[in-house]
Image (cartoon, helix red, strand yellow):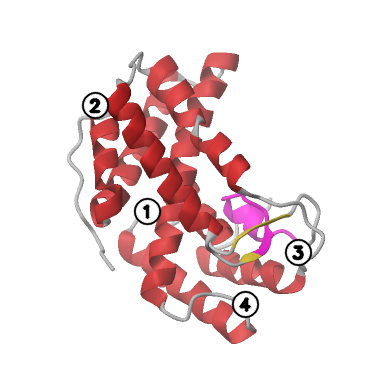
Amino acid sequence: MTTEPTPHAAVQALLQFQIRVPVDGLPAYGADRLLAELELFPVWCVQREFGRSWNASEQALWARVSAQLVGSAQAQPRIAVRGRGSLADAHTRPGAQGAVAGPITCDIAALLRDGGVAEDEGAALDLAIRWWDGARRAGLPVDPDFGECWRALEWMGLQRQLMLLGLACRDRHDSGTAAAAAHAARLATLLAAASKVTLRYGPLKPLLRLLQPLQGDTVGAGYTF
């Protein structure tokens, strides 16, 4: 029976992948792909899952927030990225198969935010610091200011959470295999996590106007940098 690696081991394995796999020659994980991933949210989650339609003002709000998230990702240094968020994925043998040239925080954001590896805010922060410190020591082009690195990681994580909301709804509508209760719980978890990030950063707070009609839970502010 295979034992799933611990979060700390997964962070170390991720660093080894990022250190060993060169970015040169990898296909780009660029703005077009990021925007296409974000659009899964309004199409499949908002419209198909919840049956809501945005008015012109809400559509403009979404376009602004999408541009901010994509701009943040595009402003980051590019390294080899796998874009998968499970502990097992992070701990596989480093290799370039399936890798793309993407934002430096993409894989650590996927690890911390996609599947609840570190649902506790303090644990997530600890793992992010361990990754950031290891990346700095290894000479990876991580931001020397951890506060700015954490902001970029959170914004990248929000992009992924919105994408995952769309994917979860698309997969359920396409295949119908996900149990209703598990599907609803997954959406609630992702919506709550996304809302917490929007509350932490002024430029993202307008997004709450689009998220809150899809959930009823009150969320807290958490850490702010």
The image quarter in which residue 23 lies: bottom right
Q: Are marks 4 and 1 in contact (CB under 8 Å)?
A: no
The image quarter in which residue 223 lies: bottom left
Task: Name the secondary structure under disc 4.
Answer: loop
Q: CA distance from mark 1 to mark 2?
A: 23 Å
Task: Name the secondary structure under disc 1.
Answer: loop
Give neighbour class at mark 2: few <14, some 14-19, many 20+ (Cα, 10 Å).
few
Q: CA distance from mark 3 to mark 4?
A: 16 Å
Q: Label for residue 140?
A: 4
Residue 221 x %, y %: 20, 55
Mark 4 vs mark 2: which is more N-terminal?
A: 4
Q: Which residues are magenta?
A: 79-94
Q: CA distance from mark 3 to mark 2?
A: 42 Å
Q: In what quadrant of the picture does the C terminus appear?
A: bottom left
Q: Nearer the viewer, residue 214 or 111?
A: 214
Magenta stretch holds residue 90: yes
Classify residue 38 as left or right of residue 4.
left
Q: Is residue 176 visible?
A: no
Mark 1 vs mark 2: which is more N-terminal?
A: 1
Q: Residue at x 53, y 22 (%)?
A: 170
Residue under label 2 = 213
Give neighbour class at mark 3: few <14, some 14-19, many 20+ (Cα, 10 Å).
some
Magenta stretch holds residue 17: no
Mark 3 vs mark 2: which is more N-terminal?
A: 3
Label 1 amino acid? Glu
Q: CA distance from mark 4 to mark 2?
A: 40 Å
Task: Name the secondary structure under disc 3.
Answer: loop
Q: Label for residue 94?
A: 3
Q: Label for residue 119?
A: 1
Q: Nearer the viewer, mark 4 or mark 1?
A: 4
Q: CA distance from mark 1 to mark 3?
A: 26 Å
Q: Nearer the viewer, residue 76 or 190?
A: 76
